[in-house]
Amino acid sequence: MSRYFSSQVSQLTPYTPGEQPKDQQYVKLNANESPYPPSPGVAAALNAREAAGLRLYGDAAARELKEALARQYKVEPENVFVANGSDEALNFAFLSYATDGRGVAFADFTYSFYPVFCDLYHIPAQIVPLREDFTLVPEDYYGLNKTIVITNPNAPTGLAISRDQVEGIVKANPDSVVIIDEAYVDFGGESSVALTKQYPNLLVVQTYSKSRSMAGARLGYAIGDAALIRDLETIKFSTNPFNVNSLTMKAGIAALAEQAYYDENCKKIMETREYTARELEKLGFTVLPSKTNFLFAKKEGVDGKALCQGLKERGVLIRHFDKDRIRDYNRITIGTPEQMDIFLEKLRELL
Ligand code: PMP
């Protein structure tokens, strides 16, 4: 830290992304990326003409992309906010709806970026513990009178709540915004996008990083009441009006025209997930029922951290979280069937 770093932010503990080591080729199952490439139209959209167009600023209003997303999700363009990854949408949402002093409520085991935003903006965090089996109790969030953020399906557990349960929480907090982070919803979860038409306090955040194979393009979006979206636009135009670059916008539009390809990938990933879960269970693992592109699993008597390290030494990356209650577990991203067989083979060796 330099001696110039402002005391307002100098105590921050930043978010730690899944590692991207370059020392060797790994079977990479540690960052919930897709094992499949983007659809052909995406590559075609990133052409020489678009490269030449980079001399100009893109469309700060992101009109075409918003229209395409609005068609896809059966809402209006004014219900759509686009962002440089869903992390940015979440960042703006925390800044917009959670800095009035009432604070934010979220689970003890959920996306680890939320506490970082709380730190950054000096937002009091109310941690709502998940049950012993990691399920979320919707009633715990009723009448909290503060911003609520729920990853659904949750990470790193993979467990989901239903749309009706989300609706219960939204209804029970009419004076606060409820943010539903649906980063993993396309792998078997129930989306709450349709509820945004009825509830002006519901914001649903999604991403191209997982089911649409575009983590590197950095494209996320939020869907909600037009007034909520205007708030996010105010923050965007107060920080970075061209937050989504023009190439990514083109790629994002092209991907929506080939949605069937991504639906097929999700189906494959869900099948591979069920196969991997069964194989892990055969090896004596406890595997939480996942609605995501990852599994959360542990084996009695096996040290979670050592397992993660042992697999890394054998060329397979998975993710371990060194925190009480989940220390025995590892989060394993679902890759191709071939990748999962390598993972299982190395795991058997290790055990
Ligand atoms: N939400 C959740 C729950 C996530 O796991 C991630 C991925 N780290 C994100 C949001 C952010 O994804 P991105 O910024 O790539 O859209």
Image (cartoon, grey):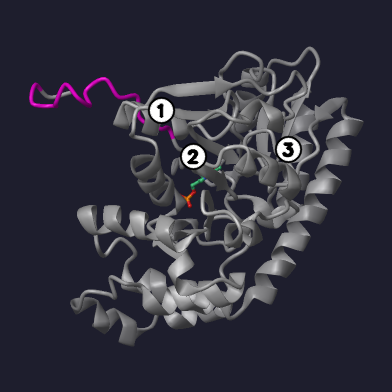
Which residue is label 2 attached to? 176
Using the image, tell me which numbered label, if any, was put on residue 209: none
Three-letter residue code for mark 1: Arg
In the rendered image of this protein, does residue 334 appear above or below residue 130? below
Which quarter of the figure is the N terminus placed in?
A: top left
Measure the alpha-carbon separation of dots 2 and 1: 9 Å
Q: Residue at x 16, y 21 (%)?
A: 7
Q: Earlier in the sequence, mark 1 or mark 3?
A: 1
Q: Name which residue lies at 81% across and 15% down.
A: 300
Per the image, the residue denoted by label 3 is 159
Q: CA distance from mark 1 to mark 3?
A: 28 Å
Residue range highlighted in magenta: 3-16
Residue 114 falls inside the magenta stretch = no
Tell me which numbered mark, 3 or 2, is placed earlier along the sequence.
3
Neighbours of disc 2 within 10 Å: few (<14), some (14-19), many (20+): many
Q: Is residue 166 left or right of residue 119?
A: right
Task: Answer yes or no: is residue 197 visible.
Answer: yes
Q: Nearer the viewer, residue 87 or 118?
A: 118
Label 3 amino acid?
Answer: Leu
Circles 2 and 1, Cβ within 8 Å, touching? The answer is yes
Residue at (63%, 50%) from the top-left corner?
A: 184
Which residue position holds label 1? 102
